[in-house]
């Protein structure tokens, strides 16, 4: 890979910007100053530094975000703030996108990446990747609701959902539950509860596959996945 492409890919600006940077004599490859933009480097074996700081090459980016309400799961929008707007310039440079969607008013775990292959695998209906949600429900949630979800309920458009697993944390005038589904239909959790005569008043995604929301992340915060988390996603997808 050419050094100008390497540095541009890592967020040091356009090819033109990188040429100016190279003229400043602050770019070194394996300890030697490089000024030629056409110089080829091995992004794995060579050590590239800019102003003494090593630049580690990465093709893909993997981020865990605790999505806040009021923000939409999209790369751009004319009217609303998107999850991409919450990222820093260094992350936006990689052009990540949300893997799947959370409703505008839904909080919780959202994976962002530019790895299209992994995203496809996680979203493929054939893979049945489990997603677990915490919700507060207006109305008494019962074991009968759990049996209905396990058998599959019919949504307002006639679609019958696949097997889902309900855990009742507290049942009352406002119940608290966890629900695990393996699909991603539009407003699915809300529509499932509507099918049994109840309303979701708060919804938060806790996990997707092996990836669990970091409790240390405040709403709107994000971090890079650990190697262990990424390996788990790729192995168990």
Image: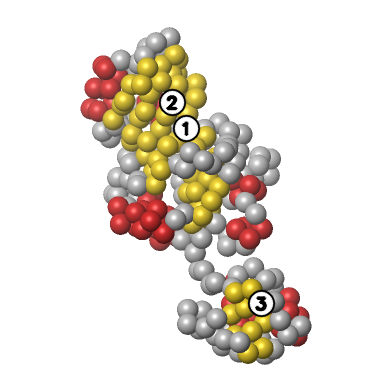
Report which residue position mark 3 lands on.
Answer: 52
Gap between marks 3 and 2, in whole Å? Answer: 49 Å
Which mark, residue 204? 1
Seen in the picture, residue 161 relative to 84 is either above or below; the reply is above
Considering only vertical position in the picture, is 18 above or below 237?
Answer: below
Residue 175 appears in view: yes
The residue lying toward the viewer, choosing from 168 and 156, is 168
Instruction: Decide which of tag 1 and tag 2 comes sooner along the chain.
Output: 2
Relative to 145, is 228 on the left or the right? right
Sooner in the amino-acid sequence: mark 3 or mark 2: 3
Q: Residues within 10 Å of mark 1 (few under 14, many from 20)?
A: many
Give the quadrant of residue 235. bottom left
Give the residue displayed 42% in from the left and 37% down from the top: 206
Q: Measured from the top left, where is residue 231 in percent x and y?
A: 36, 58
Q: Residue furthest top?
A: 173
Tell me which numbered mark, 1 or 3, is placed earlier along the sequence.
Answer: 3
Residue 153 makes an appearance in the image: no
Q: Residue at x 62, y 58 (%)?
A: 92
Residue depicted at 36% across the width and 14% down the height: 171
Quarter that holds the N terminus: bottom right
User: Label 2: which residue?
Assistant: 135
Vertical arrangement, residue 124 with respect to residue 10, above or below:
above
Query: Circles 1 and 3: CB distance less than 8 Å?
Result: no
Q: Quick check: 115 left or right of 210?
A: right
Find numbered disc 1 in the image and state the secondary structure of the residue it sits on: strand
Q: How is the image coloured?
A: secondary structure
Name the front one of labels 3 and 2: 3
Relative depth, front residue between 27 and 182: 27
Label 3 close to label 2 by CB (< 8 Å): no
Say which mark, if any, is on residue 102: none
Q: Residues within 10 Å of mark 3 (few under 14, many from 20)?
A: few
């Amino acid at each position: 890979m050419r050094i100008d492409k390497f540095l541009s890919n890592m967020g040091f600006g356009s090819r033109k910007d990188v040429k100016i940077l190279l003229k400043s004599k602050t770019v070194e490859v394996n300890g030697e100053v490089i000024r030629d933009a056409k110089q080829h480097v091995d992004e794995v074996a060579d050590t590239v530094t800019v102003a003494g700081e090593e630049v580690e090459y990465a093709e893909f980016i993997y981020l865990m975000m605790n999505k806040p309400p009021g923000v939409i799961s999209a790369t751009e929008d004319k009217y609303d703030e998107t999850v991409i707007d919450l990222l820093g310039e260094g992350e936006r440079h990689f052009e990540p996108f949300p893997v799947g969607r959370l409703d505008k008013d839904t909080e919780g775990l959202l994976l962002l990446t530019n790895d299209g292959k992994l995203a496809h695998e996680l979203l493929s209906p054939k893979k049945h990747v489990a997603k677990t949600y915490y919700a507060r429900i207006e109305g008494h949630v019962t074991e009968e609701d759990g049996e209905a979800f396990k058998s599959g309920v019919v949504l307002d458009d006639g679609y019958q959902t696949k097997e889902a697993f309900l855990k009742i944390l507290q049942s009352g005038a406002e119940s608290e539950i966890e629900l695990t589904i393996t699909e991603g239909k539009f407003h699915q959790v809300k529509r499932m509860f509507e099918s049994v005569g109840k309303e979701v008043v708060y919804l938060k995604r806790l996990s997707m596959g092996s990836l669990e929301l970091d409790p240390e992340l405040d709403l709107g915060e994000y971090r890079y996945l650990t190697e262990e988390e990424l390996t788990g996603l790729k192995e168990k997808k």
